[in-house]
Image (cartoon, helix red, strand yellow):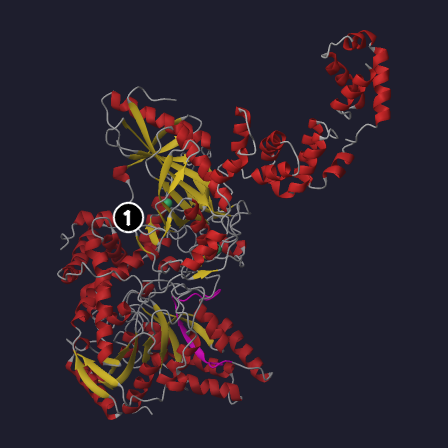
Amino acid sequence: MKSAARIAREVQSGETTATAELEASFAAISRRNGELNVFLHVDQEGARDQAAHIDARVARGEPVGALAGVPIAIKDNLCQIGVPTTCSSKILEGWRPPYNATVIDRLALAGAVCVGKTNLDEFAMGSSTENSAFGPTRNPLDPSRVPGGSSGGSAAAVAADMTPIALGSDTGGSIRQPAALCGIVGVKPTYGLVSRYGLIAFASSLDQVGPLAKTVLDSALLLEAIAGHDPRDSTSLPEPSPSLVAHVEDGVAGLRVALVHELVEGADPEVLEAVERATAALADAGATVVQLSIPEIRLALSAYYLIAPAEASSNLARFDGVRYGLRVDAKNVTAMMEATRTAGFGAEVKRRIMLGTYALSAGYYDAYYGQALKVRTHMIDAFARAYREADLLIGATTPSVAFAFGEKTTNPMAMYLSDVFTIPTNLAGEAAVSVPFGTGEGGLPIGVQLLGPGRSEARLLAAARVLEIADGRP
Amino acid sequence: MSLPHGWEMVVGLEVHTELQTATKMFCGCANAFGAVPNTSVCPVCLGLPGALPVLNERAIDLAMAIGMALHSTISPSTFHRKNYFYPDMPKDFQISQYDLPINAGGYLDLPDSTRVTIERAHLEEDTGKSTHLGGSGRIHGADRSLVDYNRSGVPLVEIVSGPDIRSSTQARLYASELRAILVATGASDGRMEEGSMRIDANVSVRHADEPFGTRCEIKNLNSLRSLQRAIDYEALRQVELLEGGGRVRQETRHWDENLGATSTMRTKEEAEDYRYFREPDLVDLAPDIAWQDRVRAGLPPMPAERRATLSARLVGANDAQLDALEVVIDLGLDPFVHHAIDAGVDPGLALARGANELAAGLEDIARLNRDAFSATLLMEQRGELSSTQAKTVLGELLAHGGEPGTVAAAKGFEQLSADTLGTTVAELLAQFPSEWERYRDGDEKLAQFFIGQVMRITNGQANGKAVVAELRARR
Amino acid sequence: MAPPLRREDVAHVARLARLTLSEAELDMFTEQLGQVLEHANDMSALALDDVVATAHPFGLTNVVREDVVTASLERARVLEMAPDAQDGRFAVPQIMGDAP
Ligand SMILES: [Mg+2]
Ligand SMILES: [Zn+2]
């Protein structure tokens, strides 16, 4: 499939049309969606209207945006007017939002064509897309394995060449981990860089919307289109969208890169080896390499699995059967709410709601939630110290390549541990990229993770581009 | 009411007031009371998945104005989520300030010079409104309820007093003084009957100088009268309980206006676990000095100061006038009274018309300008309008607006010409010769008789003073 | 160090969260949540008394909007989402008690 950059260029120049590219996307979806279960909903009519609108503008010589005519897949936790939005949960089945997420509006402004909504772990809670009420998504590179999660559908859409780019959301690694497992690029932007308005909240202080793409350049294009201040999100950073595409080829000469011990600790040998080779590639390109230890990273998992569920328990309270979505009738309103929530939520969602409710409840707040917030501060301080010695950190995205279905579903703690390298960035509110680098067991891709301080996306993408070239994708 | 000898009540009040902003606390929906149900709602105030709150700047201005009027310290503050499930609350949590309120501490001096401390005055959002179907139309026994979210997300300030109030009369005084302050700052319209100001009372009893007793919180006090009755009832209930050897259970109680009694709503053991935590969708609030100064500069004089100013113009006021003064201050009508006095109206007359006619027409007060008020009273004072006519003219001005002269003319309240009055009086004297005789002999009471007759004949158009002048001239 | 999670804690939390759990689910959640909380005990060893809790990664303050009315949703569209509606309002079964 053509890259997003190329489609936009060709649509603008008239070499192709948005409609032709959309039909190619539809064709790819119909070829493999039955097998892979990537899209929960394909918005044929809406997407065709959007594409026709772009083509009409081009025909009239009117300006079209940087993503003109580029088909894009949308994670199904982003609200789009009139398009079913489920969060892969029975509790929202059939709900059609009456408003657009800010990122959806920005995509329209950039000329992108929203093809449909992709599968995810219910309410983005999971690392394998096995927790979807509408069945798991399969990894396009090896359908016996998971695509990762929770943005597994969006990662698979790109990996299966259904769309060149996709939107995901990352609360504890939900963009980077599936990107790594599907062999594509995923960016977790700085907290506040991309508006959360219209992103159905999992953990508000950690959630960020971000791009999944085949190439670093496409990630930069997409991120630039969706980033920038949004007055509808109080936590949105005050500045406009940064310039990223212009810096993709900046290289890493003169940058200090630190290989972090705790970001490869416990990883499979083939993963460790890929990270070391990637580090060497950055050195070859002119970076200075050091080794660092950030022991606070070991506490991230514990803090995350209290903070995220605590916020989630409150965010998901609104699904009570009163105003929208599922209702299971009962004799009084309390019983109705309880019956609705019991029937509507899957096991993992219930597990996290219970955990978060407990962490916030009277008597346990200080020991759990309060302490986790302090650990969060502790971690932010530790990263700040690290960034005095290095401009970028490097490590693994995941401890292993894509795992098989059912491998971790019986033991939640084992599943949670697969996010151990990605979670620290979310807690710190900083930025990170996962870029494919080499392969491991069964020829499956390995993701290398680059981490930077807040607002370092341009630097991270330039470094990721160096690795992309070194890995043989010029 | 007083408690049995040796007992003292201890009362603290929590007053919720809706703020008079154009829009809701966290979204741009109109803050419109009583609009068609569910027409002033959006993704934010309906709690739709993905929607996020953004603070209304004006709500913060008004909250600070309240704090300044109550001598609070304006402080850096945060927002929390108070989590509980209830169908009129779209997110199933309320955004409220918790450990760090915008206004910390303060006090309110009552007209009787008691100082009531203010613990805090914080921002929070209102809920939607339920209507109960079936049963008695009340929540208990209803089999179905309907929810309107127009009120959901309307900004509130909750003002929490210290336990400094010692009688129901004082509680009433506090509530009415606070209401006057809220009206003065422009933060609230102070209308309890419409629910824009709502009061909960914490009541306990003790023997004087002993430590505080166990308190009960009374909900649903929708008028100053209910407030006073409920506190008296509850304090007496607790005294009787304790004197009978029982003990007071900490609980929330509901005031039933019809029964005139409180009843258990929820005991402490059943109290919700609200799982308060910082609202992650909002950032800290820390109004700087410039912002605070801007709000302070816009603050009008407060009721206590206005009371002193007006009372200085009413030298030797009687009790009725002092009551009228309270009404005028409470309702914010004193600018009309001052304007009239400045224009030359007798202070007593200006106060009376303010406390009666203007107070009765408060809802329409925007239609009446101060010049029209003063002009009407001057016409009355000069004898061009009778007092009944002046009241009618004021009522008409409030209802439809206009100019007093035009309104009076349209009502036919024109002065009788001196000729017509003279003719009418002459005819009357011929008709009632013996009464005229007695009047001429000095029986002044008969002047009233003749005034009454003239009024009857002229349909009230004559002026009493003019009739007396006519009689005197002929005596 | 917080006390170990008990079955009755899980039952209490389920009530707070408006979830009904079967006996088997109660057992399962008690064990699984217990494991996560036990893992979290690695944090309790840390002396963080002087550390300020971070609720937001970036210290933004005073983010406000002007008090200007913007369009509300159309009522028909709002009620179309409702599982049950009557007389322009959202309908719910019997409410058992006053709001707290
Ligand atoms: Mg409150
Ligand atoms: Zn609204």
Which stretch is magenta? Answer: A65-83
Number of residue marks: 1
* Image side of residue A366 versus residue A196, left or right: left
* A217, above or below B379, in the image: below
Q: Nearer the viewer, residue A254 or A50?
A: A254
Quick one: A296 or A39, which is closer to the camera? A296
Q: Is residue B314 visible?
A: yes
Q: Residue at x 40, y 72 (%)?
A: A74
Say which quarter of the image contains residue B55.
Answer: bottom left
Quadrant housing the C terminus of chain B: top right
Please identify the quarter of the rendering in which residue A141 is found. bottom left
Q: Amino acid at mark 1?
A: Leu
Residue carrying label 1: C16
Q: From the viewer's perspective, tell me whether residue A271 is left or right of residue A147.
A: left
Q: Which sits in the foreground, B91 or B203?
A: B203
Q: Nearer the viewer, residue B124 or B166?
A: B166
